[in-house]
Amino acid sequence: MVNKNIYRVGCLDLGSNAIKYKQYRIKQDNEKFYEELEAYKRIPIRLGTDAFKKRKIKKKTAQKLVEELETLALQLNLKKINLIGGYATSAMRTASNGEEICQYIKQNLDIELTILSGEDEAKLLSHLTKKYPQNGTHLFVDVGGGSTEIYYENGESKQIQSFNLGAVRVYLEEENLSDWKDLEDYLSKLKDSPVRKIIGVGGNIRSLISIINKNQNLSISIDQLEACMSKLAKYGKKEKMKIYSLSKDRADIIESAAKIFIRIMSLVPNSTLQSASWSICDALVRNFINENHTGLSSELNKTSS
């Protein structure tokens, strides 16, 4: 019988376009722990504008980030939810003061934030391979605000790569031609691979597919994605927000995200694109569970006594 006692945890994803908070219930079934998503919050702070244009997070932006996290931490403390920390990605690793800001948050809010390297961020995509065939037919791609991570596994062979191509970075025109060339060179190595499906991760691909299909689980072709991009190009930001129910900070970068996915699909012949409902917060909570079996058993047993 499933143990009905619950241990709640929260974790953060400090992305380049927004801050995401996810809250999970951790349950136990005999010796196995599993997580269920309980709540999600998106905080519209675009760290990427400062990081990619100025190479530094401005004081005003950092102050807003700290205030939002302080409010969140207080709310979680009242609800007795354990905030296990979070990952910071491309914007924070690009900003010269990224480490300094994370240290300040640790010292003043007791929130542990790990700035991931591009390679470490790409490695997290390996969590997805358990849900899909591991025979080389699937390519896992995370197009974020500041970078694009790719993970490919075919038997014993694994390829992990990160590129400084993200929707915010491309929108701000802060990417380099060499970044596109690096992406093309990498994907050219897969031209003889059996890849037929690209699994996209993140809000950008979910938004694009929702514009094309009502069913998020359906795959799309490169022709459909190109047609979608042409349609989006006809509208301004406010029109896209109204017509497609896009948030303000998604409406302006959505075409840049589509541009990256189109380039990837063009270099992986005969591939289709599908979205996966996964994020690096899911990887963070899974790592937490794997590393804290004894402690979690103790916490769950407390609630049952």
Image: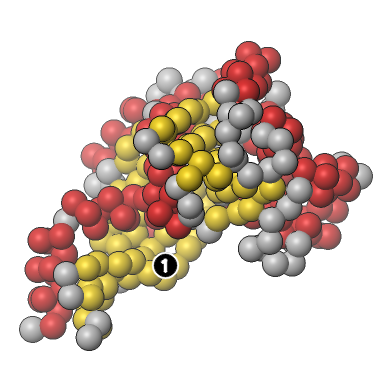
Q: Mark 1 packing: few (<14 Cα in 10 Å), some, or many (20+)? A: some
Could you say which is closer to the camera, residue 124 or residue 109? 124
Above or below, 11 against 270 in this view is below
Could you say which is closer to the camera, residue 251 or residue 101? 251
Could you say which is closer to the camera, residue 207 or residue 266? 266
Residue name at image x 37 percent, y 36 percent: 156
Residue name at image x 34 percent, y 50 percent: 284
Residue 258 spot, x, y in % from top left: 73, 40
What count of labels does the image hold?
A: 1
Q: Which residue is mark 1?
A: 37
Residue name at image x 39 percent, y 49 percent: 127
Q: How is the image coloured?
A: secondary structure
Above or below, 51 against 300 in this view is above
Residue 104 spot, x, y in % from top left: 30, 35
Left/right placement of residue 106 relative to residue 301 reads right
Is residue 305 visible in this depiction of the protein?
A: yes
Residue 296 spot, x, y in % from top left: 16, 64
Amino acid type indicated by mark 1: Leu
Residue 14 falls in image quadrant: top left
Is residue 89 visible in this depiction of the protein?
A: no
Q: Residue furthest top?
A: 178
Could you say which is closer to the camera, residue 32 or residue 245? 32
Left/right placement of residue 95 relative to residue 26 reads right
Element on which disc 1 rests: strand
Residue 41 spot, x, y in % from top left: 49, 60
Quarter occupied by the C terminus: bottom left
Residue name at image x 57 percent, y 23 percent: 189
Above or below, 101 against 15 in this view is above
Quarter occupied by the N terminus: bottom left
Residue 27 falls in image quadrant: bottom left
